[in-house]
Image (cartoon, rainbow, N blue to C red):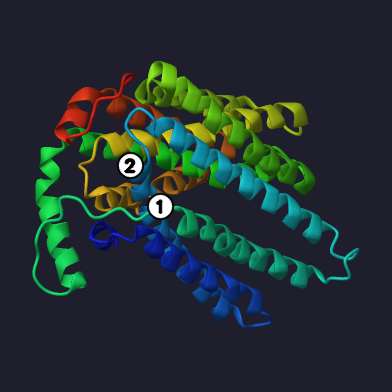
Amino acid sequence: MGAIADRTANKKRLLGIFAWTGAAFAALIFFATGDNWHLAAVGIVGGNFFLAASMVVNDSILPLISDEDDRDRVSSRGWAMGYLGGGLLLLVNLVVFTMHETFGLTEGLAARLCMLSAAIWWAGFTLIPVLRLSNHPPADVVPQSGNVIKQSFGQLGDTLRELRNYPMAITFLLAYLFFNDGIQTVIGASAVYGSEELGHSQTILIATILLVQFVAFGGALLFGRLAHTYGAKRTILGGLVIWMVIVTAALFLPEKNVPFFLALGVAIGVVLGGTQALARSYFSLLIPRGKEAEYFSFYHAMDRGTSWFGAATMAIMLQWTGSYRPAIFALIIFFALGALLLTRVDTERGIRDAGNEVPQVV
């Protein structure tokens, strides 16, 4: 998909096709009733497939609409708006679900309507980039024979062979593999940790999830400002230190202490959006022009293809110790390794290797 996108001038149309197809798959979940779980399975798998494809195209557009000095700010604002939008929809969904009897809905219908609303939300907001963005002709496309599929596989082969010419990009991808896996595992396990280990009610967990969403909006903007002053690499490293503090604090968090649990949620929200936004903009500086989508496909492969490492680590620790506390603390190794690898990235060399302009602050 990345190689196809790099050979396409009308990337916004490709983004729309992937996003709307994914939204259509997601909408199938609404029609999964009774024993018809197969329809939901198709919707979940298809929706996630086209979500991944649309995110590759979406991220590849970032270098086309912002220069090197503006990249962190644009990426941070994008992630911030994403968390704000997700938080607003989640808030509406929670009201509909928890008050379904007030609206004359069954619990099952309310849940299915929430899933349908997510598909409609996704499809509706995709109209904005499709209608407002401009087309950008492909740059530095390697001539290939055959149809677009064969050409794209040929270009992908050339890119894989050239990858060794960008060692800083490869080093960052390895760093991202570790620290992003730690982030995703903390987010995925936080609700289970809060209920099973700390004994919090579903109401507290829901409130914390909402809190994280809205704090992440401000956190992404804050990290964008910090990157403007200190550079993206230093700011990401600072965020990873905070992530290590978070999993350490989780080890000692007292049971049923709501203020401490909410405070931990605030800390997660602050670094969540910021590290994700800056990781994207920082990586965009280390990749060559004309192959943005291909390199972002590698970037998302580090995200999706290895996301089981952290979960496996937690499962092993839980089996070994019988407690979620050391299991979640074990994730500190992912943030530590990610930070260590990130310190090995020579930012200016990576930017020059990729043929990009070195920003005023790196």
Q: Label 1's element? A: helix
Name the kind of residue labelled 1 in the image.
Answer: Asn
Image location (x, y in percent) of residue 169? 23, 37
User: Callout 2, which amino acid?
Assistant: Pro
- Above or below, 206 against 242 in this view is below
Q: Which residue is mark 2?
A: 63
Quadrant (top left, top right, bottom left, bottom right) of the C terminus: top left
> Where is the N terminus found, in terms of image quarters?
bottom left
Q: How far across and how far down the image is residue 301, in percent?
A: 32, 52
Q: Secondary structure at mark 2?
A: helix
Tally of numbered discs? 2
Q: Which residue is mark 1?
A: 58
Q: Examine the image and state in which quarter residue 110 appears.
A: bottom right
Residue at the farthest bottom position: 35
Dot 2: within a 10 Å radius of its alpha carbon, few (fewer than 14), some, or many (20 or more) residues?
many
The picture places residue 224, in percent across and down from the top left corner, at 48, 28
232 on left or right of 248? left
Observer-nearest of 47 and 16: 16
Give the residue drawn at x 41%, y 31%: 72
Q: In the image, residue 168 lies at what x, y percent?
A: 20, 32
Q: In front here: 196 or 353? A: 353
Residue 36 seen anywhere in this rendered image of the structure: yes
